[in-house]
Amino acid sequence: MSTIFFLLLAACGSGSGFTDPSREFGPERPTEGAPHAVHIHQPPGLGVADVDLADARGVRLGVPCATCHGDNAEGPWVERDDAPQDFHGNVALEHGTLSCDSCHQSDDRTKLHLADGELLDITDAMTLCAQCHGVQYRDYTHGSHGGMTGHWDLQRGGRDRNNCVDCHFPHSPAYEQVMPVHPPRDRYLDLDDSHQEGH
């Protein structure tokens, strides 16, 4: 019995299966040349402290961390009398039990560091995120986390990927709870009793 079934299956599968033969195969995949690049977005706010100011167009301004903490800054601002008091007071650090020094280099706030002490530029924040969030980074590298635009097949075209901090604020990365959308409305439930009798 099973032999007859497989013979029938093979006979049915021997045809193309498409009425229009031009639809049987997609365009050929390019095989020559190097794959296209994957571009990871660098957010403009990386390494910039938010301030409650905006320019003439209403775009929020930021102060680069290097202004006060970089190599060219005029001395350590925290020790100066004219240093802004509580400048970082609006930063809500809600990232597990981490402190500022868990990620930022203590003597140069324009640098990050891994758990083993390796220094990173602030633009390499994804490497820092990946050391603790391995599952999310694995999913990111496989395309199921983080979002992308462009081509899955890099032989056909390039791809643009989001950075971790495009979606997650580094100091408090969890999404805030939101109210769900309204449920679908049943127009008959909104009617008074006299109108419902006929339905």
Image: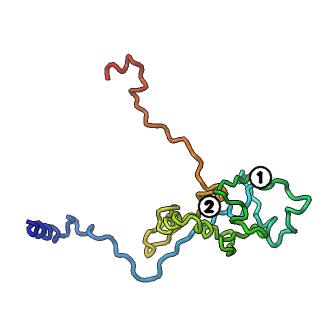
Q: Nearer the viewer, mark 1 or mark 2?
A: 1
Residue furthest out toward the top = 194
Residue 49, given in percent of the width and then of the height, sits at 74, 59
- Left or right, 87 with respect to 42, comes to right
Q: CA distance from mark 1 to mark 2?
A: 20 Å
Given residues 6 and 115, the one toward you in this image is 115
Residue 179 visible to the viewer: yes
Residue 20, given in percent of the width and then of the height, sits at 22, 65
Q: Residue 152's image quarter?
A: bottom left
Crowding at dot 2, Cα within 10 Å, few <14 / some 14-19 / many 20+, comes out as some
- Left or right, 137 with respect to 69, comes to left
Amino acid under disc 2: Val
Amino acid under disc 1: Gly
Question: What residue would you read off at disc 1?
Answer: 89
Residue 157, given in percent of the width and then of the height, sits at 47, 72
Residue 55 visible to the viewer: no
Question: What residue would you read off at disc 2?
Answer: 165
